Image (cartoon, helix red, strand yellow):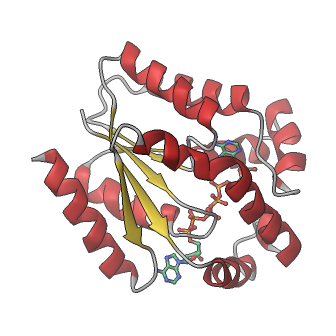
Amino acid sequence: MFNIILFGPPGSGKGTQSEKLIAAYGLKHLSTGDLLRSEIAAQTPLGLEAKSIMDKGQLVPDEVVVGMISSALDQNPQAKGFLFDGFPRTEAQSVALDKLLKLKNTEIGVVLALDVSEEELVSRLLNRGKTSGRSDDTNESVIRARIAEYKAKTTVVANYYSTFDKVVHIKGEGSVDEIFESLRSEIDKRMS
Ligand code: AP5
């Protein structure tokens, strides 16, 4: 089993590259943002609570997302590996993920961190907001709050995995295909 964390700020291309990576490697894609948006669409109590937090650009509580990931791991015993997108986002989530994977006799193989400038992130997300229907993309102050939340709480995740020598930085600007090739070359080095 080979497990990957695709890491980076909001708008860095995690979702875009995840689609290509799962097609290339047959991994199970686990995006906490997508899982939360499914709860919102189904109007569950969890979804309603999460929506008000997401609309402010803040992170939902660790126990909520860790619970969702734990269930998803249990529901996919045959997976060849997992691609985590938007998770973990705090050090507590990272520690919880490592424990969950250890219970399954596996671990994170690599953390691929997409580096993109803040102005490019804002521009991409405002552009996506014109058509995505995502309420957290529609105004610049919420987008900047998401980036601030990332800097305050999520950048530490890269430091955490750096101590295990698992982080590789990838230039996240350029064409989607160029970035995909950079990701692929790092994965292939570690899978072989
Ligand atoms: P989440 O859904 O994870 O959103 P995000 O991290 O804010 O990331 P995005 O989906 O906005 O961006 P992305 O990096 O996937 O980029 P994409 O490929 O879409 O989280 C949403 C919210 O849920 C959080 O704010 C939080 O409240 C909550 N949440 C989720 N997980 C959580 C957790 N673990 N803990 C707590 N709370 C959590 O690309 C963006 C745009 O750029 C697209 O339009 C795309 O077409 C374009 N683009 C992509 N690549 C390129 C390129 N190379 N050049 C030009 N444009 C590009």
**Residue at 70% of width from left, 49% of height from top?**
37
Q: Nearer the viewer, residue 94 or 101?
A: 94
**Residue at 39% of width from left, 79% of height from top?**
176
Q: Nearer the viewer, residue 168 or 133?
A: 168
Q: Position of residue 11 (x, y in %)?
A: 61, 70
Q: Eyeballing the image, is 192 above or below 163?
A: below
What count of labels does the image hold? 0
Q: Eyeballing the image, is 24 above or below 92?
A: below
Q: Quadrant of residue 182?
A: bottom left
Q: Position of residue 174 (x, y in %)?
A: 41, 86
From this viewpoint, which residue is outermost toward the top?
103
From this viewpoint, which residue is outermost toward the front?
163
Is residue 143 toward the left or the right of residue 183 in the image? right
Residue 34 appears in the rendering: no
Residue 163 appears in the rendering: yes
Is residue 63 toward the left or the right of residue 2 in the image? right
Is residue 98 toward the left or the right of residue 147 in the image? left
Q: Quadrant of residue 148?
A: bottom right
In the picture, the quarter occupied by the N terminus is top left
Is residue 62 toward the left or the right of residue 184 in the image? right
**Quadrant field for ligand 1:** bottom right
Q: Position of residue 138 (x, y in %)?
A: 82, 74
Q: Position of residue 136 (x, y in %)?
A: 80, 64
